[in-house]
Amino acid sequence: MNKKAFLKAYQTINKLAEPKAQVPTEPEYQSDLYKSAEDEALIKEYHFAKFKKNLAQAQGHPELQSLINKEDWSEEDTKKLLAMLR
């Protein structure tokens, strides 16, 4: 083995032994409920949009508003409210 090959072998070994530059990565996503952070964001956005839609429908429904503002409720009013909320 000549001197050049010997030095090359040491350089190669030193390169392998050096810790590679750690590229900062995002911490691994931990959740039992969602597969990824993107999934969590999409699902939460979907549910929020659904909530906003239901809120707009409830606020714009005149029969529901009249039931809510009513002082004394009968059994029929309760059934009517449950039917509207379904």
Image (tube, rainbow, N blue to C red):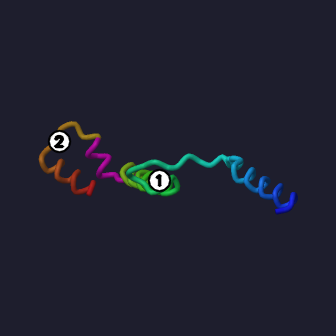
In the rendered structure, does residue 18 fall within the stretch colored magenta? Answer: no
Depth check, front residue: 63 or 19: 19
Outermost residue on the left side: it is: 75
Depth check, front residue: 74 or 38: 38
Residue 45 as seen in the image, left or right of residue 11: left
Report the residue at 74% width, 52% height from top. 15
Give the quadrant of the N terminus: bottom right
Looking at marks 1 and 2 on the same chain, the residue that comes earlier in the sequence is marked by: 1
| Alpha carbon distance from label 1 to label 2 | 40 Å
- Across and down, in percent, residue 28 comes to 52, 49
User: Which quadrant of the structure image shows residue 2?
Assistant: bottom right
Amino acid of disc 2:
Trp
Depth check, front residue: 81 or 50: 50
Look at the image and give the residue range highlighted in magenta: 60-68
Q: Residues within 10 Å of mark 1 (few under 14, many from 20)?
A: some
Q: Pointer 1: what residue? A: 40
